[in-house]
Image: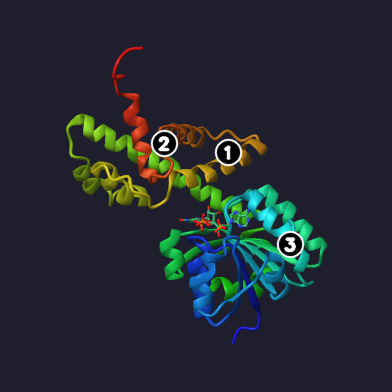
Amino acid sequence: MAQERIGFIGLGIMGQPMCLNLLKAGFSLTVYNRTPARMQPVLQAGAVAAASAKQAAERSSIVITMVTDTPDVEQVLFGHDGVMQGLKANSVVIDMSTISPSATQRMAAQIKEKGSQMLDAPVSGGDVGAKAGTLAIMVGGEAQTLERCRPVLEAMGKTITHVGGHGMGQTVKLCNQILVSVTNLAVCEAVRFAQRSGVDPRVMIEAVKNGAAGSWQLSNLGPRMAAGDFAPGFMIDLQQKDLRLALQSAFEMQLPSPGLSLVHQLFSACQARGEGREGTQALIKSLLALTQKPAKEN
Ligand code: NAP
């Protein structure tokens, strides 16, 4: 079966099911997680535990990271007992977290200096896609490195697209987040418009969703907004991390991004009201707040 030995670091909501799919595909898997208890389901399925990211790298030819943000990837790769202290020459580091494109380029250069390669391979599809092995994976890096790693990525995802050089996978992931969040705002406005006009928003959604205005956000988030269901599919706090990364990249490129900035501000208002752990459809509460009269004058 598979020749590559895989090390996987970061067994959170996404990492755990991705590991289970790697085991199902027959890969030998060494895992490391900062909080050891979170490794249990994957160890029971046949993975081997490492005591550090360094040890996971020592035992692997391909090391995958799936942690939270840019400083976390930096720490896991370059920090004390990190991947770089154990990585053998001619290995590959695949970072599947959503992080900064420019920081990714710097990390890829550092890894190349040590005789190995990096791919950025962020994903879309959420925990549902991670469990089903149907993630969309956007890959930046060298084409021949992707070909070496393709069977590994195919165990976790359905659509694997090489989008360009180092950092470009992260760039495309941020494009995805711009599209998702600005469309979300359009859905909020249409739902409010229907409500204020006396049209049932659920009827409005049914009437337009198969036409030119159709979108995943309209079909999935619109009915939840109409029902006042704000339970998280994807949390506002995590969405804000991605929008912050997109705004930072836009700033670095001196590129105006007015729609993105506005949604980021409206989500900030949600966070200020303590709604950061609600689903992204709770964006509509920021529009509702704009038309609410204060309970009493100061
Ligand atoms: P999560 O459940 O919060 O898991 C984060 C993982 O990273 C945990 O294993 C955590 O370890 C580890 N970690 C974080 N900081 C670390 C550090 N400094 N050192 C060592 N380990 C560290 O998050 P997730 O939902 O799996 O998301 C992971 C990545 O995928 C994020 O970049 C996210 O934006 C992206 N993503 C998520 C989704 C989604 O729907 N959830 C969809 C697409 C992409 P501990 O267990 O010790 O905390």
- Residue 234 placement, left or right of 27: left
Q: In which quarter of the image is ligand 1?
A: bottom right
Mark 2 lies on a secondary structure that is loop
User: Is tag 1's residue or tag 2's residue first in the polypeptide sequence?
Assistant: 1
Identified at 65% across, 55% down, the residue is 73
> Are discs 1 and 2 less than 8 Å apart at CB?
no
Residue situated furthest top in the rendering:
298
User: Is tag 3's residue or tag 1's residue first in the polypeptide sequence?
Assistant: 3
Q: Is residue 185 above or below residue 130?
A: above
User: Is tag 2's residue or tag 3's residue first in the polypeptide sequence?
Assistant: 3
As shown in the figure, which amino acid type bears the numbered disc 1?
Answer: Leu
Q: Nearer the viewer, mark 3 or mark 1?
A: 3
Label 3 sits on residue: 81
Label 1 sits on residue: 247
- Residue 9 placement, left or right of 243: right
Q: Which of marks 1 and 2 is in front?
A: 2
Mark 1 lies on a secondary structure that is helix
Residue in front for this viewpoint, 59 or 222: 59
Identified at 77% across, 64% down, the residue is 85
Identified at 63% across, 35% down, the residue is 251
Q: How is the image coloured?
A: rainbow
Q: Is residue 163 above or below residue 24?
A: above
Residue situated furthest front in the rendering:
37
- Based on the displayed image, in which of its 4 quarters is residue 277 positioned? top left
Identified at 54% across, 83% down, the residue is 26
> Are discs 3 and 1 less than 8 Å apart at CB?
no
Residue 117 seen by the camera: yes
Q: Can you tell me whether the CB of the residue at mark 3 lies under 8 Å from the nearest atom of ligand 1? A: no
> Are discs 2 and 3 less than 8 Å apart at CB?
no
Disc marking residue 274 = 2
Q: Position of residue 58 (x, y in %)?
A: 73, 73
